[in-house]
Amino acid sequence: MKRGTVVWVDLSDTTPPEMGKVRPGIVVSGTAHNEMLNTVVVVPTSSIAPEIWPLRLAVGSFAGKESYAVIPGIRQVRKGRLRGALGQLSREHLAALDECLDAYLR
């Protein structure tokens, strides 16, 4: 699985404020690691606006809706939770997402 791929991911079995249900998510773990491990790290997306840097970032349109990466929702998931690819994040959006992750995790 390539880093920056947008996938349907099943985030069920959560408790608020965790994000649940099947929704698009962005794979942010490294491509080489994704090939070797049974898990990937994803940032879930939401269609709820607005952008709030560095917590929520507009990343384009997926599944017919404008999408916002929800940085605090980052989590590791089993590949068995992935339900198919929706596309690939642009280089510009992936670079902006990296900036948000860096700011959030420091």
Image (tube, helix red, strand yellow):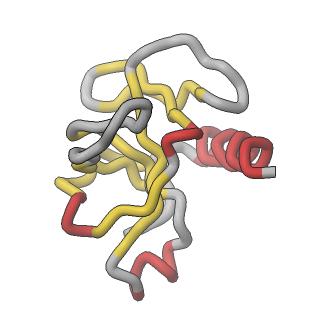
Q: Residue at x 38, y 45 (%)?
A: 25
Identify the image quadrant of residue 72: top right
Tell me if 17 is positioned left or right of 104 in this view: left
Please report the residue visible at 55 percent of the width from the left and 71 percent of the height from the top.
Answer: 30
Name which residue lies at 64% across and 43% down.
97
Which corner quadrant holds the N terminus?
A: bottom left
Q: How many marks can you see?
A: 0
> Can you give x and y, in whole percent of width and height, for residue 2 in the image?
44, 66
| Camera-side residue of 77 and 58 | 77
Residue projecting furthest to the bottom: 36
Q: Say whether residue 8 is visible.
A: no
Q: Measured along the vertical axis of the image, is residue 3 above or below residue 72?
A: below
- 13 lies above or below 52: below
Horizontal side of residue 95 vs 30, given as left or right: right
At which x and y percent is residue 77? 35, 62
Residue 69 screen position, x and y as percent = 51, 34
Tell me where residue 18 appears, x and y as whole percent.
41, 37
Q: Is residue 59 left or right of residue 54?
A: left
Q: Residue at x 23, y 47 (%)?
A: 13
Whether residue 13 appears in this view of the structure is yes
Extreme top residue here?
50
